[in-house]
Image (cartoon, rainbow, N blue to C red):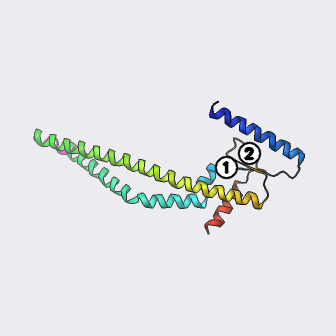
Amino acid sequence: MTAATRFLGIFATALMLSTGAQAADPAFKLGVVDTERIMRESAPADRVKKKIEKEFAGRDQDLQKLAKQAKDMQTALEKDGVTMSDADRQAKERDLAALTRELQRKDRELREDFNRRRNEELSGMLDQINKTIRKMAEAEKYDLILQDAVYRSPKVDITDKVLKALAAEAK
C-alpha cells in the first residue's frame, strides 16, 4: 500500500466520520488551515527568517568577497593575458581555477548548512504552530481541524485566526 493510498484512505475515513458527525450533531465544528501560508506569513516565520539571515550573513559576505576576487582575477587575466609570458599566464589560470573551486565548495557548504539550519528551525516552528492550533481548537471547541487541504471553503478556513493567534503569542 503506497503512502498516497494510505492518505486517501485516512482522508476518506475522516471525511465520512465528519459527515456522519455533522448529520448527528449540527454543532459539528470543522476548520481547515493552510500550513504553507502560515509557514510564510506568521510571526514565528518572520523570526526564523531573520535569525537565519543574521546567522549566515557573515559567511555570505565572505562568499561575495571571494566571488568578486575571482571575477577581478578573471578580468585581469583577460586584459593582461596576451602580454604575459606563458608561464605567468598559466600560473594565473591555475590560481583562478583553484579560487573558482574554493568558491564553488564554499557556496555548496553554505547552501547545505543553510538548508539544514532552516529545516531545524522550521521543524521547531511547525511544533509551535501545531500547539497553537491545538490550543485554539480546544478553546473554540473545534471537532476537527485539517491541514493543507486541496480545497477549502472560506467558511471553514481558519488560517487567518491561526496567524492572529501566533502573532499574539509572539508579543
| Residue furthest out toward the front | 1
Mark 1, residue position: 34
- Residue visible at 64% across and 30% down? 1
Of residues 83 and 15, the one nearer the viewer is 15
- Secondary structure of the residue carrying tag 1 is loop
- Residue visible at 64% across and 64% down? 167
x%, y% of residue 46?
A: 55, 60
Kindly identify the amino acid type of the residue bearing the numbered disc 1: Asp
Of residues 144 and 36, the one nearer the viewer is 144
Mark 2, residue position: 152
112 inside magenta stretch: no
x%, y% of residue 40?
A: 59, 53
Q: Principal SS element in the magenta part?
A: helix
Of residues 153 and 2, the one nearer the viewer is 2
- Residue visible at 70% across and 35% down? 8
For marks 2 and 1 on the same chain, the one whose residue lies earlier in the sequence: 1
x%, y% of residue 73?
A: 23, 48
- Residue visible at 63% across and 54% down? 38
Whether residue 84 is visible, yes or no, is no
Q: How many numbered marks does the figure carry?
A: 2
Q: Please indicate whether residue 10 sits to the left or right of residue 92 in the image.
A: right
| Residue furthest out toward the bottom | 171
In the rendered image, the vertical position of residue 93 relative to residue 49, given as above or below: above
Kindly identify the amino acid type of the residue bearing the numbered disc 2: Arg
Whether residue 77 is visible, yes or no, is yes
Q: Please indicate whether residue 105 sits to the left or right of residue 46 in the image.
A: left
In the rendered image, the vertical position of residue 10 relative to residue 133, given as above or below: above
**Magenta stretch, residue numbers:** 78-82
Of residues 169 and 131, the one nearer the viewer is 131
Q: Please indicate whether residue 89 sits to the left or right of residue 9 in the image.
A: left
